[in-house]
Image (spheres, grey):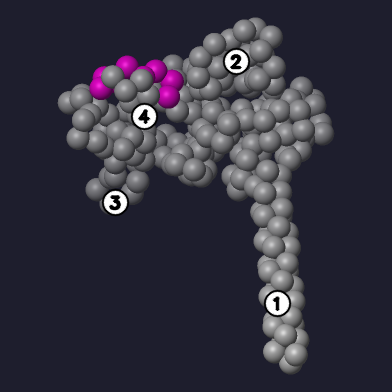
Amino acid sequence: MGFDILSTNNNFKSHFLKKRLVLSLSFFLFFSISACHKTLKKNNMLWDSHSNATKRRRLVADAYQLKRARSYQFEDAHFSYDCSGYIASILHRNGLLTKKYARTQKVKGNGVSILYQFIEKNGSILDKDQFPKMGDIVFFSNTYDRNRDGKNNDVLSHIGIIENVSNDGQITFLHHSSGKVRKSYLNNGFANQHKDKNKTLLNSFLRRRRSSDPSNTKYLAAQLVHSYGSLILK
C-alpha cells in the first residue's frame, strides 16, 4: 500500500510539473509572438500640415523608431519584413499610402518598383548624379541576381532612406538588409572606393561577392545607385 501511495504522489507531482511547464511555455510564446507582431501606430498630425524641413526630420525620426520593429504591421495594413516593407512603413506612418495607391492604380512590380512608381507620381525622381537631401529615398539596382539569370539586369532591387548628407557629399542611409535595419554609406564623388587613405568608410558594400558574378559586377553603394526619390516638393 505504501508503494502505491508513493507512486501516486510521484505521478501527481510529475503531472503538476508538466502542466506548469506547458503553461510557462504558452505564456512565453504568447508574449514573444505579441512582441514580434506589435501593431504600429500612425502619426496623428497630417502630412500636409508640416513644413518641408519638419517633414524631412519626421521621416528620418520614424525610420529610427521603426529600426527595432520585429514586423511592419499597422491596424489597417501589413508590409513585408524587408527593404521595401521598411520604407513603405515609414511612408504609411505619415499617411502616404503606397499600398492603397498600388491597389487602386493597379500598379505592378516588386516592392521597390511600386515605391518608385508611387514617388514618381506623387513626388519627384532625381537622377543618380544629383544630390539628395535628408528624408529622400535612394533606389539601387543589381544588388543581387534577383531573376537568377547570371546577368546584371536587375533594376530596382533595393531601397533605403537618406539619413544625412554632409557638406563634402558623404551620404548616410538606413535600409533593411539581411533581417535587420542597418546604417550604410555612399559617396558619389568616390564611387569606386570603399575607404579613403585614412581608412574612412566612403561606400558600403551592398552586394555579396559570388564566384558566379559576371565580370562587370559592381558591389559598392555608389556604384549601384539607380536614382533618388523625394516626396518633399521643392
Label 4 is placed on what type of residue?
Thr
Identify the residue shown where x is 53% and y is 22%.
111
Q: Which residue is at 69% across, 17% downward?
A: 100
- Give the number of the mark in front: 3 or 2: 2
Kindly report the secondary structure that dominates the magenta region of the rendered protein: loop
Q: Are marks 3 and 2 in contact (CB under 8 Å)?
A: no
Specify which label sits upstream in the sequence, 1 or 2.
1
- Mark 1 surroundings: few (<14), some (14-19) or many (≥20) residues within 10 A: few
Element under disc 1:
helix
Label drawn at residue 156: none
Q: Residues within 10 Å of mark 2 (few under 14, many from 20)?
A: many
Can I make out residue 124 in this image?
A: no
Q: Secondary structure at mark 4?
A: loop
136 up-or-down from 29: above or below: above
1 vs 2, front mark: 1
Q: Residue furthest front?
A: 1
Image disc number at residue 199: 3
Q: How many marks?
A: 4
| Mark 1, residue position | 11
Which dot marks residue 143?
4
Q: Amino acid at mark 1?
A: Asn
Q: Residue 52 location, x and y as percent?
A: 68, 26
Residue density around tag 4, few if under 14, some if 14–19, many if 20 or more, within 10 Å: many
Residue in the image at 49% along x and 43% along y: 179
The disc at residue 118 is: 2
Residue 151 part of the magenta segment: yes
Q: Earlier in the sequence, mark 3 or mark 2?
A: 2
Distance in Å between CA atoms under marks 1 and 3: 66 Å
Mark 1 → mark 2, Cα distance in angstroms:
64 Å
Q: Amino acid at mark 3?
A: Lys
Give the class, few, some or many, for how many residues have Cα within 10 Å of label 3's Cα (few <14, many ≥20): few
